[in-house]
Image (tube, rainbow, N blue to C red):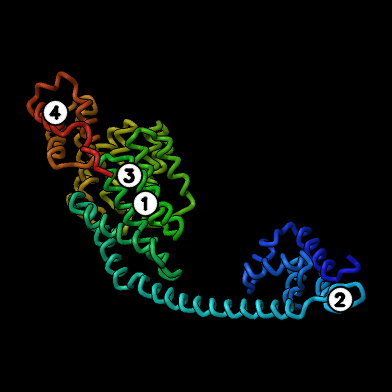
């Protein structure tokens, strides 16, 4: 090796390369700004002792391999003719320089092509970014749905909700700027939530869980509290009406640090009904007090229906039935029915029907039941195409009607109407 400077240079390059655990191709791949295939060929020729790379390339090898300039130092020896050494052919060295120049030209040509691609990408981004006017229209739609949701038939809402949900998904599949993305995510979360509620009210629990899970991902990313709490309320309802009361409570506890005046009363109400179903009367009453303290007159927002005077009465009456406090149930059921009849800001068809059924239920409790009155009130609800939870409560009334009442005309008519409905509404398709 001492007698062959080219061989010595090649051996040193191989030693440093192998010490770095790189193949010839691996080293060439790390040479930023150099053509990979040409560089690999030059490395191979050098390690075989055929020719020496250019000084600039050897300097790059020194830096990449951490050789500290040792390879460049050997280059001077390899290119100086000494007795018994092999001189690097001038043609080889010139050829290497030409290869390097050609490589540089190719790299600059590639840079020009990349700049054209950059312009094309920018134009694509500009054309694909969601239009602000379109987002404003979708904002208006979700606000309108929040107002109409409690009273509009779900079958009429579904096409609009589903259409906007798909449109927002298409937006997210394309390019959305960092400035616009939170707005699109929040809207997609809100429409996912509404689809979840539509599925839940149609007794399609599988779809309701899926939409709630998707909505929660959007809500968590944007940190929107009304949406986060509304999704928790939906999940709690799915568990509650499936008689998994501990889960219904746990879901609400998981978002305990998230608060918003619009949602605080509903979260407290849902905690109260779960505690009542679990037999914790003291905790249920405390939660009801918190509900009443935080209730208010709110304009509907994209999310759960607000809890006002009517909602306070409906939830107090319902929990009263569950914990066996007949006086509380009768008093607050009458208040709820009266307040819902006024159609205030917290009005919804579903919760007004729950209030009426709770009022009907109170006619079956106590020492002097009135099954005819209870059945007549409940039949009117069953005939109005109710949601899954309302129909389930109507079935609970049916179950409380003792066999001795079955001959009463109002009871027979109610049982017949419920029989035509079944115990739940047909599940919607996914």
In front: label 2 or label 1: 2
Q: Residue at x 29, y 65 (%)?
A: 138
Q: Earlier in the sequence, mark 2 or mark 4?
A: 2
Which residue, given by chain and number where applicable, does mark 3 sit on? 208
Which residue, given by chain and number where applicable, does mark 4 sit on? 415
User: Where does the image place residue 149, in percent across and percent down from the top left?
Assistant: 24, 54
User: Is 143 above or below relative to 198?
Assistant: below
Q: Earlier in the sequence, mark 1 or mark 3?
A: 3
Extreme top residue here? Answer: 404
In front: label 2 or label 3: 2
Which residue, given by chain and number where applicable, does mark 1 sit on? 230
Q: Which quarter of the figure has residue 177?
A: bottom left
Cα separation between marks 2 and 3: 78 Å
User: Where does the image place residue 299, in percent across and percent down from the top left?
Assistant: 28, 61
Q: Earlier in the sequence, mark 1 or mark 4?
A: 1
Mark 3 crowdedness (10 Å alpha carbons): few <14, some 14-19, many ≥20: many
Extreme right residue here? Answer: 83
In front: label 1 or label 3: 3
């Amino acid at each position: 090796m001492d007698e062959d400077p080219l061989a010595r240079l090649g051996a040193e390059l191989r030693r440093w390369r192998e010490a770095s655990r790189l193949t010839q191709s691996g080293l060439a791949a790390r040479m930023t700004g150099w053509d990979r295939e040409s560089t690999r060929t030059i490395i191979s020729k050098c390690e075989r002792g055929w020719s020496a790379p250019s000084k600039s390339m050897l300097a790059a090898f020194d830096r990449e391999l951490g050789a500290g300039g040792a390879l460049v130092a050997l280059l001077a020896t390899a290119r100086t003719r000494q007795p018994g050494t092999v001189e690097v052919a001038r043609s080889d060295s010139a050829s290497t320089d030409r290869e390097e120049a050609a490589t540089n030209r190719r790299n600059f040509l590639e840079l020009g092509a990349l700049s054209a691609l950059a312009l094309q990408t920018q134009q694509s981004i500009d054309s694909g970014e969601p239009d602000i006017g379109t987002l404003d229209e979708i904002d208006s739609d979700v606000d309108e749905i929040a107002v109409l949701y409690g009273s509009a038939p779900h079958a009429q809402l579904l096409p609009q909700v589903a259409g906007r949900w798909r449109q927002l998904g298409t937006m997210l599949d394309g390019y959305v700027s960092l400035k616009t993305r939170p707005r699109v995510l929040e809207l997609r979360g809100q429409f996912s939530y509404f689809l979840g509620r539509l599925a839940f009210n149609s007794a399609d629990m599988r779809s309701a869980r899926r939409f709630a899970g998707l909505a929660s991902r959007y809500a968590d990313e944007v940190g929107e509290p009304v949406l986060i709490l509304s999704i928790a309320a939906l999940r709690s309802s799915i568990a509650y009406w499936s008689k998994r009361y501990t889960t219904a409570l746990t879901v609400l506890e998981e978002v305990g640090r998230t608060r918003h005046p619009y949602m605080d009363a509903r979260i407290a109400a849902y905690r109260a009904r779960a505690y009542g179903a679990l037999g914790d009367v003291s905790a249920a009453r405390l939660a009801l007090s918190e509900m009443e303290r935080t209730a208010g007159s709110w304009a509907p927002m994209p999310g759960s229906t607000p809890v006002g005077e009517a909602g306070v009465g409906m939830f107090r009456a319902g929990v009263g039935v569950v914990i066996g406090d007949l006086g509380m149930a009768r008093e607050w059921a009458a208040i709820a029915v009266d307040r819902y009849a006024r159609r205030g800001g917290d009005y919804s068809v579903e919760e007004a029907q729950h209030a009426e059924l709770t009022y009907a239920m109170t006619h079956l409790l106590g020492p002097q039941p009135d099954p005819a009155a209870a059945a007549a009130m409940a039949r009117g609800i069953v005939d109005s195409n109710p949601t899954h939870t309302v129909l389930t409560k109507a079935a609970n009334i049916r179950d409380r009607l003792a066999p001795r009442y079955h001959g009463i005309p109002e009871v027979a008519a109610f049982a017949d109407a419920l029989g035509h409905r079944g115990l739940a509404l047909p599940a919607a398709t996914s």
